[in-house]
Image (cartoon, rainbow, N blue to C red):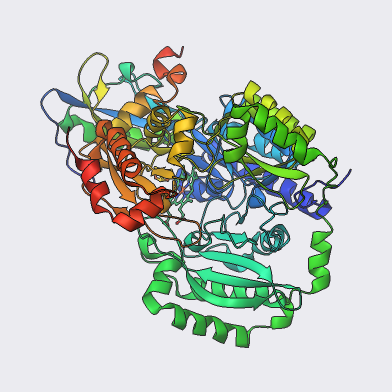
């Protein structure tokens, strides 16, 4: 059973996963694609997230991603994850600034 | 092809098997990619081949049996890091190497490249007997009684693909040493083995069971004091059978052998093993001297020749160059041959990432091994690298060569020689980042003269309770905890993995990340201020107890 999501004011949910082919962290975009950059992620309200998540999980194999789940972000531009773990997934290992995801493509 | 110094020479059977295994895995990857296999079905298959999914990418863990490599293999690891990863690799506390940025689709090709040099990633994950670890000075140290590599190789052959032990209740780790100075943390392994010569000259084995770290740290207990060589495999087989039959499978946190040994007591465990031995076909497992000799013959013995004045040359060079002298003091160990010395190369540059090496450094290490140590390299369980047989009069040249690639740090066994797991920068299970705190501590104590002044002091850091960084066994241990999404560190003191193994005691409430380094600096100051002449950190801690250290750590400024 999924835990009920409780968001603080100013927070939204995003969907994230790892790419099957190379394991890279990706974020779900409103057009149904997956992107390395959290800045392109679709921001979801708590009440819609559950249904979207179920749909996206069902399409994970077709979309080439594994381990889809939702996580809370501050709804800024770009959105910033709430937990340290998701910040590190979004931006890359803090000990290798040269691998920062922001600098890719 | 000549036989490699240091590790066992594989043959046709080993190589055919590796190729078949890679072909099998390649088929599994194909079926995963085309959707025939679901992630749930595929995950255990990839883990059996050492492939994990971490936070940012797949991670491939490559086995280094008993931590020994030849230069050809090391060079290959460097090439893989360059070609398939982001130009570096991470050496682990289990004497393995991990690559952090691997693509699933590249994995079969990487495994083929590894197989070219007799390497693989099998049994580096999963509930099986993992890579057997051994003393990093095996076959070289003056204080060694029995060379553990021959029996480590016998254990490797026995445990590889052992059909009965492929689905144990949980992972199983074995370490073996042949020195009275425990350099393998024998009492923190599921089975720890200490070999020594018996009365008739053949080795006998002291066996500990049920040690481990993780969320329930336990010091292994002695099961047998003197197992004869011929009964070594039968005894291990019986220990594993008892565990396989009675270890818990209902709760992953209670599944290790240590929980079973704690639950029934070591005496009952011994009785169960003895009962198993009585009804086993002992002939089948008898380890005959000829079999041991045959294995031994597949290790080449280095021809240790040194000029008569090698020792004098080294002594003079040490007098002439204080920096070199400092490195020799901390980074070498006495070799059994008076003309040779063991050099430990630190992978802990001040402010760097413990255990990481760039492709260029890895390839250079292979070159230096060729030039100075019979092409042989060992990885230590403290995430460093050893060249086992260096001629004393050539040690300084080696040191100069190391300095060119930033590998001449003089800190082995000192406060800068920090052990740290990958932590939250990579690991999907982590609560906190281990590496940045290691880097800050490394930078804080960067001065190697200060490190020498502080003396023997090990810091171990784990990013979560799984304890991959051995924090319970650190003289000072740091455990990362998550408090509402923020990183905190719990401090322990007094752990040790060497002789007299002990689990560290928690000093108090976990500290916020940004206060942790200062707290440790105050701990160290407390020791420096109160130690008596000749005392190490552990000595002072034992004499004074924890209280002064607790006060120092939590003192608010
Ligand atoms: C993806 C990375 C890793 C994962 C998922 C992982 C997972 C785990 C888990 C779950 C445990 C606890 C086992 C138990 O108590 O039953 C553990 C223990 C351990 N791991 Fe790791 N680990 C990782 C990386 C490493 C690395 C990099 C090292 C070496 C630096 C390492 C060495 C160890 C050791 C020595 C232990 C403790 C000994 C023991 O009780 O087994 N692990 N690991
Ligand atoms: S101790 Fe925890 S954080 Fe560190 S590598 Fe092991 S599982 Fe990951």
Q: In this view, does B369 lie to the left or right of A57?
A: right
Residue B404 location, x and y as percent?
65, 21
Q: In which quarter of the image is residue B362?
A: top right
Residue B159 location, x and y as percent?
64, 62
Q: Quadrant of the C terminus of chain B?
A: top left
Q: Is residue B225 above or below residue A32?
A: below
Q: In this view, does A6 lie to the left or right of B191?
A: left
Residue B183 location, x and y as percent?
57, 55
Q: In this view, does B146 lie to the left or right of B511?
A: right
Front residue of B349/B338: it is B338
Q: Is residue A21 left or right of residue B199?
A: left
Q: In this view, does B507 lie above or below A20?
A: below
Q: Is residue A17 above or below residue B44?
A: above
Residue in view at x 44 percent, y 32 percent: B450
Residue B200 location, x and y as percent?
76, 78
Q: Is residue B110 above or below residue B388?
A: above
Front residue of B382/B49: it is B382
Q: Quadrant of residue B34?
A: top right
Residue in view at x 80 percent, y 72 percent: B289
Tell me, yes or no, if residue B425 can be seen here.
Answer: yes
Looking at this rendering, what residue extends furthest in the left direction? A9
């Amino acid at each position: 059973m999924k835990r009920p999501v409780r968001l603080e004011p100013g927070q939204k949910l995003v969907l994230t996963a790892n790419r099957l082919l190379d394991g890279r962290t990706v974020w779900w975009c409103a057009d149904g694609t997956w992107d390395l950059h959290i800045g392109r992620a679709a921001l979801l309200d708590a009440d819609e997230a559950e249904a979207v998540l179920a749909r996206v999980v069902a399409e994970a194999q077709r979309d080439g991603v594994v381990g889809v789940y939702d996580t809370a972000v501050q709804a800024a531009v770009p959105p910033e994850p709430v937990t340290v773990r998701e910040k590190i997934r979004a931006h890359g290992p803090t000990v290798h600034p040269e691998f920062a995801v922001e600098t890719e493509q | 092809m000549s036989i490699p110094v240091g590790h066992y020479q594989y043959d046709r059977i080993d190589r055919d098997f590796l190729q078949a295994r890679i072909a099998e895995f390649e088929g599994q990857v194909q079926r995963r990619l085309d959707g025939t296999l679901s992630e749930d079905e595929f995950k255990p298959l990839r883990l059996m081949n050492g492939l994990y999914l971490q936070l940012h990418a797949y991670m491939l863990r490559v086995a280094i049996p008993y931590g020994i490599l030849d230069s050809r293999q090391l060079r290959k690891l460097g090439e893989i890091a360059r070609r398939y990863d982001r130009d570096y690799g991470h050496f682990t506390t289990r004497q393995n190497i991990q690559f952090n940025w691997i693509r699933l689709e590249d994995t079969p090709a990487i495994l083929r490249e590894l197989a070219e040099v007799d390497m693989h990633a099998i049994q580096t994950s999963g509930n099986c007997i993992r890579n057997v670890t051994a003393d990093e000075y095996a076959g070289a140290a003056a204080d060694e009684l029995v060379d553990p590599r021959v029996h480590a190789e016998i254990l490797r052959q026995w445990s590889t693909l052992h059909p009965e032990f492929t689905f144990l209740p949980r992972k199983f780790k074995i370490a073996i040493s042949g020195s009275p100075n425990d350099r393998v943390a024998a009492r923190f392994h599921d089975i720890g083995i200490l070999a020594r010569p018996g009365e008739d000259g053949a080795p006998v084995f002291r066996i500990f069971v049920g040690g481990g770290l993780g969320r329930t740290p336990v010091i292994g207990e002695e099961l047998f004091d003197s197992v004869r060589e011929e009964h070594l495999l039968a005894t291990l087989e019986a220990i594993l059978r008892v565990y396989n039959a009675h270890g818990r499978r209902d709760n992953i946190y209670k599944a290790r052998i240590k929980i079973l040994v704690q639950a029934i007591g070591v005496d009952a465990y011994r009785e169960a093993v003895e009962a198993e031995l009585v009804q086993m076909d002992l002939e089948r497992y008898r380890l005959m001297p000829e079999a041991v000799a045959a294995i031994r013959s597949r290790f080449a013995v280095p021809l240790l020749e040194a000029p008569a004045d090698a020792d004098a040359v080294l002594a003079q060079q040490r007098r002439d160059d204080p920096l070199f002298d400092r490195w020799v003091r901390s980074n070498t160990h006495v070799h059994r041959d008076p003309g040779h010395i063991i050099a430990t190369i630190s992978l802990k540059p001040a402010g760097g990432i413990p255990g990481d090496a760039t492709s260029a450094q890895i390839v250079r290490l292979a070159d230096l091994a060729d030039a100075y140590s019979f092409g042989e390299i060992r990885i230590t369980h403290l995430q460093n690298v050893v060249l086992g047989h260096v001629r004393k009069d050539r040690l300084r040249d080696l040191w100069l060569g190391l300095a060119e690639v930033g590998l001449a740090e003089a800190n082995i066994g000192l406060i800068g020689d920090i052990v740290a797991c990958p932590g939250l920068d990579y690991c999907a299970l982590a609560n906190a980042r281990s590496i940045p705190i290691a880097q800050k501590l490394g930078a804080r104590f960067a001065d190697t003269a200060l490190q020498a002044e502080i003396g023997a002091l090990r810091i171990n850091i784990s990013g979560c309770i799984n304890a991959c960084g051995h924090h319970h066994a650190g003289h000072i241990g740091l455990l990362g905890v998550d408090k509402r999404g923020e990183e905190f560190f719990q401090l322990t003191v007094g752990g040790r993995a060497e002789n007299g193994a002990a689990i560290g005691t928690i000093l108090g409430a976990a500290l916020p990340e940004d206060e942790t380094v200062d707290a440790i600096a105050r701990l160290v100051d407390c020791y420096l201020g109160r130690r008596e002449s000749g005392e190490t950190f552990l000595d002072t801690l034992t004499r004074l107890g924890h209280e002064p250290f607790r006060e120092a750590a939590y003192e608010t400024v």
